Amino acid sequence: MANAFSFNVNIALDVNVVDVWAEWKQTHEKEYDTIVEEEIRKAIWMDNLVYIQTFNSEEHSYKLGLNQFSDYTNKEFQEIFLGYDYEQSLVRRNATLHKVDSSVEIADSMDWRGKGAVTGVKDQGQCGSCWSFSATGSLEGQYFLKTGKLISFSEQQLCDCSTGYGNHGCKGGLMDNAFRYWEKYYEESEDNYPYRAKDGMCQYDESKGITEDSTYRDIPRGSEQGLMDAIAKVGPISVAMDAGHRSFQSYHSGVYSERACSSFKLDHGVLAVGYDSTGGYWIIKNSWGTRWGMEGYFEIAMADNMCGICTQASYPII
């Protein structure tokens, strides 16, 4: 079971916390260097457990659950696992915009997972490289739709080699900067250039590059119709969002919405792989492994550009 422990969203506060703590540590392979550190982490975990249970006792469109982030404060979570460069994203370069052809109807729902265009859920680890996973995800979809081959592309190559384009590896970056890098350099596979969850020297080998010369398109800022059109007609789309909230840290299932979310202060790159206009949500692939959310995915409300999911959408063209 991929969600071996985060499934348990209805833990009573009067349960044997010692047993639950031990099971959670085992499930998420948590080890601490000292007894003092473990006590600190357990206290944070307990605080998050109370928050989760209180939230789940109320009426919401989604549920929270314990996961691998439950022994982190929200501030720690933001500092370690989010890496979208908000300040740099305020200046969008002169990219060609995606144009909606309203004469071509689109389906009420779309999910590229069932069409073979999405690789398995990956895990960025303790590295703010979310932007690279979002970028490779959209490239993987485009390559599949062009060639019929689903190849996992290298996030590590982007972390190590695209610094000259404004990216900073584990310290953050932008999907558009990755797309600009691909305009000059070919992208290698994950097998040839495996992920290490830390910055390193660029080991680019052009002879192992797979993709051809590429360009990219930006979707008009904040356009929900533009994002839906692009997902339906183009494939999986790179998007960014405001993911720094405690509710998202502990998200488990359902349609996410957060009143405190910003539409512009974005801090996390993810991949839009589908939508359901009748249900009113986007289907998003995250890069925190399969133990988070719905086996690594989440749904987020379509209305009002929730958490800025439509603010910085883009995709490569190969």
Image (tube, helix red, strand yellow):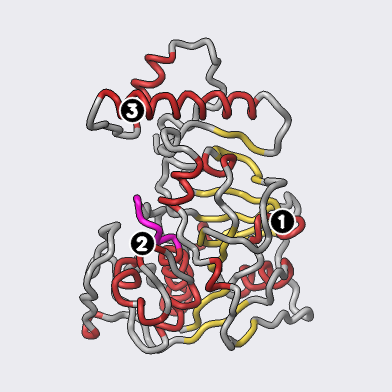
* Tag 3 and tag 1, C-beta contact below 8 Å: no
Q: Tell me the amino acid under the disc marked 1.
A: Met
Question: On the image, numbered disc 3 is attached to which residue?
Answer: 25
Report the front residue among 40 and 222: 40
Q: Which mark's residue is nearer the viewer, 2 or 3?
A: 2
The prevailing secondary structure element of the residues shown in magenta is loop
Residue shown at 67% from the left, 24% from the top: 57
Label 2 Cα neighbours within 10 Å, binned few <14 / some 14-19 / many ≥20: many
Query: Does residue 55 show up?
Result: yes
Q: Position of residue 291 (x, y in %)?
A: 42, 40
Please name which of the two marks, 1 or 2, marks the residue nearer to the observer.
Answer: 2
Q: CA distance from mark 2 to mark 3?
A: 26 Å
Name the residue tied to disc 1: 302
Residue on which disc 2 sits? 170
Residue range in magenta is 125-130
Q: Amino acid at mark 3?
A: Lys
- State the CA–CA distance, disc 1 to disc 2: 30 Å
The percent position of residue 311, horizontal first and vertical second, equals: 65, 67
Q: Amino acid at mark 2?
A: Cys
Horizontally, residue 33 falls left or right of residue 110, namely left
Residue 123 to residue 20: above or below: below
Mark sitting earlier along the chain (3/1) = 3
| Quarter occupied by residue 247 | top right
Seen from the viewer's position, the closer of residues 104 and 158 is 158
Q: Quadrant of the N terminus?
A: top left
In the rendered image, residue 129 lying in the magenta stretch gets the answer yes
Residue drawn at x 57%, y 84% is 93
Can residue 236 be seen here?
Answer: no
Magenta stretch contains residue 56: no
Q: Residues within 10 Å of mark 3 (few under 14, many from 20)?
A: some
